[in-house]
Amino acid sequence: MSETNRNYVGGEWTEAGTGETFETVNPADPSETVAEYQQSDEEDAAEAVEAAAAAEDEWANTPAPQRGAILREAAGILADRKQELTEELTREEGKTHAEAGGEVQRTIDIFYYYAEKTRDLGGKVKSASAPQTNLYTVAEPVGVAGLITPWNYPIAIPAWKIAPALAAGNTLVHKPASIAAGPSVAIFEALDEAGLPDGVANLVTGPGSSVGDTISTHDEVDAVSFTGSGEVGQMVYDAATQAGKRAQTEMGGKNPTVVSSSADVEEAAEIVANGRFGVTGQACTACSRAIVHTDVYEEFVEAIVEEAESIEVGPGDEYDMGPQVSEDELEGTLEYIDVAEKEGARLVTGGDTLSGDRFGEGYFVEPTVFADVESDYRIAQEEVFGPVLAVIEVDDFEEGLEVANDVRYGLSASIVTDDHTEAERFVDEIEAGVAKVNAKTTGLELHVPFGGFKESSSETWREQGDAGLEFYTIDKTVYDNF
């Protein structure tokens, strides 16, 4: 039987006022119901915001190291449940066990990291012009934070919003993606068990059109952080900023890996394959375009096909690549495959769903590679949230860089080269928030800023590391004359 989960509001596990619920299914076996959640509405979201507002002053006045102690305790609780959470994440979102386990561990690490960062909070001392003046700043919490997160990293992304918000002294309301809400529930179970005061953190499940919109516009919400699609993110940003709130959005990507003429082709193919086909291509930082120098183009195509065809696809508890998260996501990927063929791209491997006993009715698609893609094709311009790679041939480094920047997104980018001058130019000139040399586009350490350029981000604030704390604090300048 599936588990029925409740909202977490004011320190209590509560049912939605609507009395309605919704279910999630296992994408590797859609006949299996994984869990049941509350179908909340505007009133439920408003109640959660009001609970957060009521707890705001007490939590802000709690000494930061005491806040850190609760985060540290929650991290330990999550660590004790790591194997269980890994299996649950695989069942609900579809990741392989290795991918899910890595994501759970990252969540644990994030909570430990921000638990320790609470010891450094406070402000900065500055030199004053007057001899008897003490001049310094105090970093104060923004207030109530509204956090809206996606399904593709359903425990790590909530963690890198929740942990710094709490560390900095904010209260919060969190709406997870409905399609994979279970990992967020686990975070709140850990916080509850760790002794978080009532109302400090609140969880409400349900539609973005009601719950998310209320969080974005409620008068008591002071800051909104969103990760998800570009279309929804822009609506959230507009609604939040028009309501006078601090807002941060992280959205899509069309991430390139440039393969230089000096690159080791086998290494380049492995880097691109890991960046494209990991987590079934369902990452905003996934490599979507391989931009390859003509001197190594044909060799690279052969090598990337070999990499793609070596991937064993199946349920995430046993195989290298799991299913797409839902039927809608699978259909979206298949639509782009059809578009690419019609536009004239050459399908060199994959391109179809997978059937048979191993796959059942699951949302499985083959790792797919298109060669001879032109930069203006839709498959080279629009985000494809699935395991589909576009390979583009270029004549030289300058053209490669131009093609890499010729999209409306700018999240992550990499180059594979043995030429250090090329690497330096790439880092300087690529229009992306993350630039990597001889590495895949996916993956970022938790203590460095994360965010994009152009339509990948609101470009207002970064997440993770010290930047994550900066979004959730506001400086007060103090002149102390004695």
Image (tube, rainbow, N blue to C red):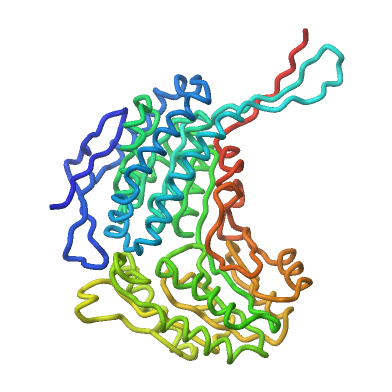
Q: Count the labels in the image.
A: 0
On screen, residue 390 versus residue 479, left or right, reads left
Please tell me in which quadrant of the rendered image residue 294 appears. bottom right
Question: Where is the C terminus found, in terms of image quarters?
Answer: top right
User: Looking at the image, which residue sits at the far left?
Assistant: 1
In the rendered view, tell whether residue 258 sits above or below residue 165.
Answer: below
Position in image of residue 64 (x %, y %)? 53, 25
x 33%, y 48%: residue: 183
Residue 358 in the image: above or below residue 79: below
Using the image, determine if residue 252 lies above or below residue 157.
below
Q: Is residue 458 above or below residue 385?
A: above
Name the residue located 43 percent from the left edge and 50 percent from the top edge: 105
Viewed as shown, does residue 434 lie left or right of 303?
right
The picture places residue 363, in percent across and down from the top left corner, at 28, 72
Q: Is residue 181 visible?
A: no
- Residue at the image point whose x is 45% and y is 19% from the top: 58
Q: Is residue 309 visible?
A: yes
Q: Is residue 450 left or right of residue 96?
A: right
